[in-house]
Amino acid sequence: MSDSVVSTRIALIGNPNTGKTSLFNTLTGMRQRVGNYSGVTVEKKTGTWLLPNGNDVELIDLPGTYTLSATSLDERVAVDVISGHGLGQKAPDLVVVVVDVENLRRNLFLASQASELGVPMVIALNCWDIAEKKGLQIDSKLLEQRLGVPVVPTVAKRKSGTEELAKAVEKAIETRPMLVRPKWPEPVQKALKTLHDELITKRGEQLREGELQRLIFDRKSAVSERLQTPAAEHQAIVKATRDQLYKDGYQPDAAESTLRYRFLNPLLNDVLERQAAMKTRSKSEGIDQLLLHKFWGLVVFIGMMYVVFQSVYTWAGPMMDLIEGVVGWVQGIAADALVSTPMLQSLIADGIIGGVGAFLVFLPQILVLFFFISILEESGYMARAAFLMDKLFQWCGLNGKSFVPLLTSFACAIPGIMGARTINDNKARLITILVAPLMSCSARLPVYLLLIGAFIEPHYGPKVAGATLFAMHFVGALVAAPFAWVLNMTVNKGRKPEPFVMELPHYRVPQVKLTCHRMYESGKEFVLRAGTVIFAMTIVIWALLYFPRSIEVEEQVYADLGISKDLKTELVSTPGGAIVEAGLNETLQGAIDAAYLEQSYMGRFGKFVQPVFAPAGYDWKITVGVLASFPAREIIISTLGITYSLGGEVDEESDDLRTTLSNAKWESGPRKGEAVFNIPVALSIMVFFALCMQCGATVAVIAKELNWWWATGSFFGLTAIAWVAAVAVYQIGMLFA
């Protein structure tokens, strides 16, 4: 349903952890669309809600927010959508405020702010069942009478109260009920009138009452950014108004909370009654005593993360193998069908099909990780983990809200970076985005498995190999901490992050349908956002690896091997010759592919920059593999397969590739004849991949979330860190080799 044909829009707004999204999913029946708001990177989730009268309305799930002060991107979107400014659509016809019964007073603070924007309203008292279990009794009819808008008790996960909510909304669309507003003291009224006269009457700004309040009460308001009045001029007006309010005895930054709660408190008299707490409450507190304990809470957290990541690799393995098999099968069919046109064959089989497979193979791991993340969030544990991590993050300029984006980045940095939008502190958000690529993503795993299997396990056994694999997943995380500290001391100039405030949600049993839906949406987001960029870059890399193409290269291979082209024809006519001819073909094709790669643009560039990587122990073949892996890091494996004449179909478990790497020798230079690979080289490569940018798609997403300056700087900065670490590991390792 397009925006042009929608006659009625309804926005859902509420504090985080009020069950707003669960209610949204229940009302829409998962009939929803996900995109981005125009001009910003914040996710736009809309769905169709069928009302009792048979009319469809568009339901908009706004980001969870405690206030409309708009200190984060999510909060700014909420303000802009409700006010109808800046996002290419009109204001909603109605707002449904989802309220947590247990935190009624604070939740109604947001409702009161939203009412100032002049939009009709309905209140949904969600989590009604939990409130009753905890001994809370609310007179919803009395509350409705005092607020002046419909108040409907709901339990989203049980679909309780949804029919009553639909009927209330249906009626409210016609009657347009408005929440009762506070009567501001005279100095505040005077300040609002001053702004109205100066900005609206004199300068023609299109502002609502609530937006004028944001200019007065917020130290830095997002409203000012879209005013037509020159910045210096309107800022001077706002400053003079705030200064006058201060002289009148009101601190602008604190006045709103004091005055709005002073208005709300009498409205809640006799509405809320707290009876004796039930046993379930003490159980909840008992669980929190364990999960939030300074020591045991960390033990539980580490154990849970171990289970999550172990499950990711165990559960996803069979599906990844299946995808690899299907991709290989399709590549074979395409190669056989296009054997007469080598360039088209390579483009389709290696470029397009291989490019699709390069990111699809990691989709199972991403789905499994997001399955667990959804369960942890729905159960209420994720907020507690964020709370637990807050103190650990504070020293390096991050806060607890950085935890979920960084955890997500272990699967793929792209959804992790986009998840940083919820961080209110812009400086903490910036640092979170810049360190997210240091988390060990799924694409790095094949590189670890190949090199550990080829060099660590044969020398030290499976236990050391397993410990090495485990350690490699956290190399990036260990570097991320001091890297974040440096960023905080430079970008933030040592400023402490804003206090971390998060409502601890109720413990809930995760809904299977919702969990699967979120897993599906996350997978789709990865394919659409990361996959498209990775695919495009893979095609570019294919072209650099394929061209230029000259028959002279192939002829030189025959000459170097001392083989006549007529030999193959002669072998077919001799007994057993066909078998020999088949093996010869395979050997020749591997040698020809390797020769073509060496002469390609990528091969030439690899040889050109190889001296830069020489201190890390890399020859030109390793260097080409590193360069070719920019679209997706695991591409280094197929590239090494080609450079060593094994073909691009090898994988991290290929015994032939492992053996070939172990036997590889330097072809020229002072080290000619020496082994290229050893344990220091293997460790150097793994460390480089652990610390460099995850992939090209990550750079593109950083550019969208921040800008291209930060994206480019991040790429070169992480590359430099990875290079320094790789060189250090190799040089130190050679002292003990």
Image (tube, grey):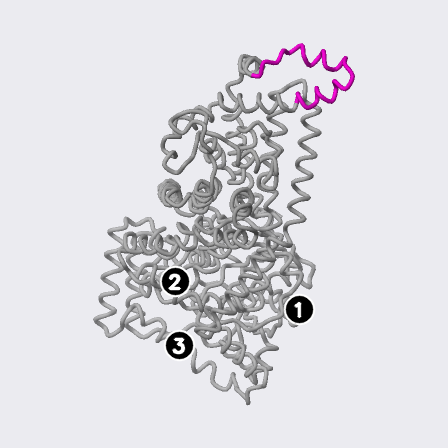
Range shown magenta: 561-585
Q: Nearer the viewer, residue 141 or 542?
A: 542
Q: Residue at x 57, y 21 (%)?
A: 592
Among the 4 quarters of the image, the one containing residue 374 = bottom right
Name the mark nearer the viewer: 1 or 3: 1
Per the image, label 3 sits on a secondary structure element best described as helix
Q: How many numbered marks, from 0 up?
A: 3
Task: Tell me the amino acid under the disc marked 1.
Answer: Lys
Per the image, label 2 sits on a secondary structure element best described as helix
Q: Nearer the viewer, residue 88 or 608?
A: 608
Please state the horizontal and vertical placement of residue 128, each as a whole percent of the image: 59, 76
Residue 261's label in the rendered image is 3
Residue annotated with mark 1:
159
Look at the picture and state if 382 lies above or below 429.
below
Alpha-carbon neighbours of circle 2 within 10 Å: few (<14), some, or many (≥20)? many
Please state the horizontal and vertical placement of residue 705, each as a whole percent of the image: 43, 47
Q: Nearer the viewer, residue 560 or 348?
A: 560
Task: Tell me the amino acid under the disc marked 2.
Answer: Phe
Alpha-carbon neighbours of circle 3 within 10 Å: few (<14), some, or many (≥20)? some
Residue annotated with mark 2:
393
Compute the Cα span from label 2 to label 3.
Answer: 32 Å
> In the rendered structure, which disc, 1 or 2, sits on the residue that comes first in sequence?
1
